[in-house]
Amino acid sequence: MEFLFRFDINYEQHFGSAVTSLILNNQNKIKIIHIILDHASLKIRHKLDIIINKCQL
């Protein structure tokens, strides 16, 4: 499965919950996750790095 997330800085916390749930519940089914942002804060970049490393994506 492929997924696309598109959001702005106001939706970061909701994106975090959605992508974490998606990965934890479908790790073996996910082919790729596309993320489109206007601006990626350091906070969201750090959290994405943690998720990627923990899930070995």
Image (tube, helix red, strand yellow):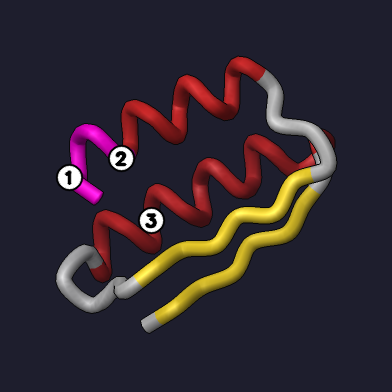
Which labelled disc corresponds to residue 35? none
Quick one: quadrant of the N terminus? Answer: bottom left
Residue 24: give x, y in percent of width and height.
Answer: 26, 55
> In this figure, which residue is indicated by the disc labeled 1?
56
- Please say if 37 is above or below 9: below
> In this figure, which residue is indicated by the disc labeled 2?
52
SS state under label 1: loop
Q: Residue at x 25, y 50 (%)?
A: 57
**Type of the residue with mark 3:** Ser
Q: Decide if residue 21 is on the left or right side of residue 42.
A: left
> In this figure, which residue is indicated by the disc labeled 3?
21
Q: Residue furthest bottom?
A: 1
**Type of the residue with mark 2:** Ile
- Please say if 43 is above or below 51: above
Main SS category, magenta section: helix
Residues marked 2 and 1 touching at CB (< 8 Å): yes
Residue 56 is one of the magenta-drawn residues: yes
